[in-house]
Amino acid sequence: MSVAGLTKNQALVFDKLTAAGGPMSAYQILDNLREEGFRAPLQVYRALDKLIADGLVHKLESLNAFVACAHPEEKCGSHGLTAFAICNECGNVFEFHHHGLEHDLEHFLGAKGFKPEKTVVEIRGKCANCA
């Protein structure tokens, strides 16, 4: 994924998350980027806000952590539903999209007159390696 159009700080945060291969808290990102001139959490949070808005990064609410999008070329911000399987043992995170589930949720919520703006599903359990 090209980081064209990102600021230096946004590109550094994105690259760090991409290289990590798993979730990182904002403070872990900060600690890893101190040599690059990062001094305050606000620098990380501003970069993360933009990366999330652009669909390049996702926040895992249950972990209070962030992951690089598994397929940033697809512009995840355009998906109605983003889902994650999170292993409780090893911490691996697998991002996936299930259009049938997305359709079912849209149908159910539409019948209730509810219009979702963002849907994130986090499923906790054990991955195949840990099961």
Image: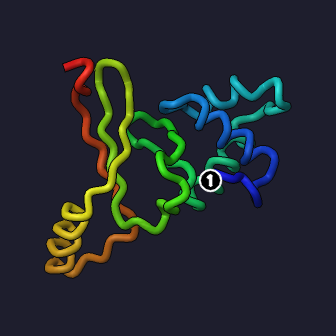
Q: Compared with residue 5, is residue 90 higher up or lower down, i.e. above or below?
A: above
Colour scheme of this structure image? rainbow
On the image, the x and y values in percent for residue 127 come to 25, 27
| Of 117 and 81, the residue lying toward us | 81
Whether residue 45 sits left or right of residue 95 in the image: it is right
| Left or right of 102 in this view: 28 | right
Q: How many marks?
A: 1
Residue at the right extreme?
Answer: 37
Rendered position, 57 above or below 33: below
Q: Amino acid at mark 1?
A: Leu
Check the image and report above or below for 69 versus 113: above
Image spot of residue 34 (x, y percent):
78, 25
Q: Residue at x 42, y 42 (%)?
A: 60
The kind of secondary structure element at disc 1 is helix
Q: Image check: 1 left or right of 94? A: right
Q: Position of residue 5 (x, y in %)?
A: 76, 60
Q: Nearer the viewer, residue 116 or 14?
A: 14
User: Residue 129: x and y, percent?
Assistant: 26, 20
Residue at image location 69% in from the left, 30% down from the top = 30
Which residue is located at x 82 percent, y 24 percent? 35
Q: Quadrant of the C terminus?
A: top left
In the image, residue 108 sits, relative to residue 49, either above or below, namely: below
Q: Residues within 10 Å of mark 1 (few under 14, many from 20)?
A: many
Which residue has dot 1 on it?
Answer: 51
Q: Quadrant of residue 97?
A: bottom left
Q: Residue at 41% across / 34% down in the picture?
A: 63
